[in-house]
Structures are given as C-alpha cells and as structure tokens.
Image (cartoon, helix red, strand yellow):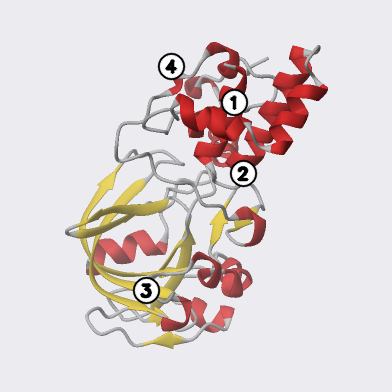
Amino acid sequence: MTMRIDPKETPTAKLHGLMLGTIGPRPIAFASTVDEDGNVNLSPFSFFNVFGANPPILVFSPARRVRDNTTKHTLENALATKEVVINIVSHAIVEQMSLASTEYAQGVNEFVKSGLTPLASEKVKAPRVGESIAAYECKVNEVISLGNEGGAGNLIICEVILMHLKEEILDENGMPDPIKADLVGRMGGDWYCRANGEALFELPKPNRNLGIGYDKIPASIRNSVVLSGNNLGRLGNIDKLPDAEAITLFGARPEIEEMKLRFKNDPESLDYHLHTMAQEFLRSDELENAWLTLLQIN
C-alpha cells in the first residue's frame, strides 16, 4: 500500500520529517558568516546543492524555525553582509559539525564551541573552517523568501568567488577522489550517510551513442525473474546488440555448453541460470558479455 499525504492537511513538523526521511542523502552546507559587528557564526544546513558552474553558484536554505517561526543567524548575517563561506563536511569533522548546529545565543562563536579552526578568508570577512576538505568563499547574489510561516525556506543564492581545496583528497588527475574526500550526507532524524566503502559505486554514463532503450529489450528478458530494473537499465544502454557470429562464438564457451546440456530438457532452469550469469557480468561492468549470455536463449 502507498500512504497518501496532503501537505495542507499535515502538521509541518511531521511533513518535515517525512520529506527529509525520503529525500536524501543531502549534502551539507557548513556555512560561516559574520554579523555587522564582526561576530562569527557557523551552522550547518542540508537544504543545499550546486546549481551552476559558469558562474559557479551554490544555493542553500536556512528555513524558518517550525516551533516559533523565528529566523536563523546565518540568514540574518547573509542579508546584512551579502557574504558567506560554504565549508564542506567530511566524516572527519561530522561530530564537530553536529555540535556547531546547537542553537547558541547570538554572538557565541561556534568555532570555539566545536573546536574547529577558523582560517582567514581572502575575499570575504567570514572565516573558513580549516579542517574542511573544501571551502567556498561566496558573495550573496540574492535571497528569496519562500514563505512567512514556520518551516518556510529562504533560498540564499551564492556565487563562488574563491575556492579552497585540500590537495590530499585529489587523485592523480588533480580531481577529487570520492574515497579520499569521505563525504557525509544528511538523512532524516538523527541519521547521516557516509559516502565511502560499499556505499560508493560507479555507474557508467548513458552511452554517447544512442542506447537501444528498455523498450527494445526482448520481452523474455524484460520479464526476467532474476534481472532487476537496474539491470535492465544497464542492458538498455548498449548502442547495438552483438551479431550472430559473436553470439555463436560465445555459446561455444565450455561453461555455456555445459549449462545448455545440463538443462536441455528444462528451459525454465536454463533461462534462470543464464540470466543469473548475465547479472554477474553486469555487476562486473561487462555489458556485452551480459548480452551475449542472454542471447543464447533468444
């Protein structure tokens, strides 16, 4: 069954929890700002992402507090100074980031409370987090209020004017290595997601040549009891099917011949085992071999 939820009939706090529990993991904008008197504020926000590269644009949203409809110091500072530094959260500082989310009184320096190191920025007044793997000095281009009630967002549209990136997270090509970056994403409630280990996987981009698409996969394969939707999506990304000669040559492999002999009187079992073998090829990113396996029975 599917739960049907009308936002207009659901308490904001519950709606907030339902949305954040299903929309994620969300990157975290660890935002440092200063007020007009120079007092530093540091606070994390998971309504955040990158929205352009030319110009480089980051957008995050300090929402109005649900409980009392007040606004956050980060929003007030961004409106007043038109500057912010977005510091990126890795697993190494996730606990300190969480501590900085405590709602201290205005004027209390969360760098001090969290034990993180403030480093002077070059183009904006707010300091950056020394332990962060990347920090983006930004000017605030625009702030868009999305409502006046508790829970309403305020989109802070920032343009990156200087970026700081720790060299130790780069690969041999000078690009960020996801394993070295060890990023953290926000989930619902008290949950986070660590982008490392088995959580990381590569997915080839759709073929630059047009893939055949799901609709061109034979029905016997589309209706497989073994292959998942993800498997079928990968199969649909091939630009053309192997030719008859390649299929015949592949069928001469000892393991294929043995399987055909073993199940010569049991076509359903043959299908099952060939589909299972094809699935293993897909897990190894051997798309053509997966097709060659499946086409032994089509």
Nearer-N-terminus badge (1/3): 3
Q: How far apart are marks 1 and 3 (CA)?
A: 37 Å
Residue 173, disc: 3
Q: Which residue corresponds to the image point at 50% horizontal and 37% vertical from the top-left?
A: 288
**Which x, y percent locates residue 30?**
45, 66
Nearer-N-terminus badge (3/4): 3
Q: How crowded is mark 2: few (under 14 residues within 10 Å), some or many (20 or more)?
A: few
Of tags 2 and 3, which is closer to the observer?
2
Residue 215, disc: 4
Label pair 1/3, CB-CB below 8 angstroms? no
Q: How far apart are marks 4 and 1 (CA)?
A: 16 Å
Q: What type is the residue that disc 1 sits on?
A: Leu
Residue that badge 2 annotates: 283
Nearer-N-terminus badge (4/2): 4
Query: Residue 238 is drawn in which quadrant?
Result: top left
Residue that badge 1 annotates: 294
